[in-house]
Structures are given as structure tokens and as C-alpha cells.
Image: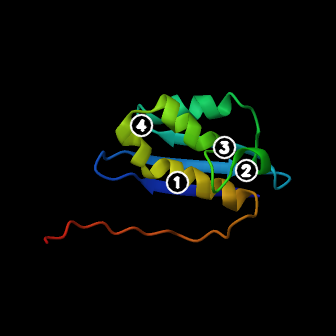
Amino acid sequence: MKSKVEIEAGVCGFKAVITAQSPDGCQVKFHINTDCPEVPKWVKALQDEGNLDIMQNFYLLREDVLVKSIRLHAPDACGFCAVPLGLSKAIQVATGLALPKDIHLKITKEEE
């Protein structure tokens, strides 16, 4: 299965398009197209792993390869970026672990 996620990351103004593909529901290949100079740093570390195996490399309750890659290769502020979440969702859909449904976050600052 193949999935696509389009992201407008927020205040930074960068956009990203993520595609992920899984021929067997376990092994995943992905590509991220973005102008952000930080994303390629952690993406390279992930892609150096080769085809990612969803069952061995992505876990809900502990640090997985995506979280580890971001922690080691991205500036602190980028850890809160929407692109890693988008990649996670693209991988889940490509492997059949999630249905393709948009996620919407509306963020406002409220006075106390």
C-alpha cells in the first residue's frame, strides 16, 4: 500500500510532502520532500537503516527509531515539528495499521 501526507508545519512556514510505501505490511520505504534544512538530517539517519520494519522499529510506548533519529540529529525546537508525526501516520497507513484520515490541530493562545 502507498500513502501520502501533506504538511504545513506551522510558524516556520515550511511545508512537506511525505510518501510511504509498504509492499508487505511490514517493510516501509518513504520519501520526504521539503525545503526545511533540518528534516534531511534526521531523515538520512532513518534511511541509513535501509527498509524500515514497522514491527521491529516503531513502538508506541518506548523510543523508536524515528524518535531516536530526531533526538540525535535535529535541533531542540524541531522535536516538536509536525513532520515526524506526519511520517509516523504515513507509515501506519502504508502498512495497514491505520486508516487514511486527516488530522486537524487548531492552535490558539488563550488569555488566563
Kind of residue indicated by mark 3: Phe
Q: CA distance from mark 2 to mark 3?
A: 6 Å
User: Does the CB distance between marks 4 and 1 fall below 8 Å?
Assistant: no
Find residue 30 and name its label: 3
Identify residue for label 1.
Answer: 85
Residue 84, horizontal then vertical, whole percent? 52, 48
Q: Tell me the quarter of the image containing the N terminus.
A: bottom right
Q: How many neighbours does mark 2 have within 10 angstroms: few (below 14), some (14-19), or many (20 or more)?
A: many
- Marks 4 and 2, the one that precedes in the sequence: 2
- Marks 1 and 2, the one that precedes in the sequence: 2
Nearer to us: label 4 or label 1: 1
User: Does the CB distance between marks 2 and 3 fall below 8 Å?
Assistant: yes
Residue 10, horizontal then vertical, whole percent? 33, 53
Instruction: Give the quadrant of residue 66.
Output: top right
Q: Residue at x 37, y 45 (%)?
A: 14
- Marks 4 and 1, the one that precedes in the sequence: 4
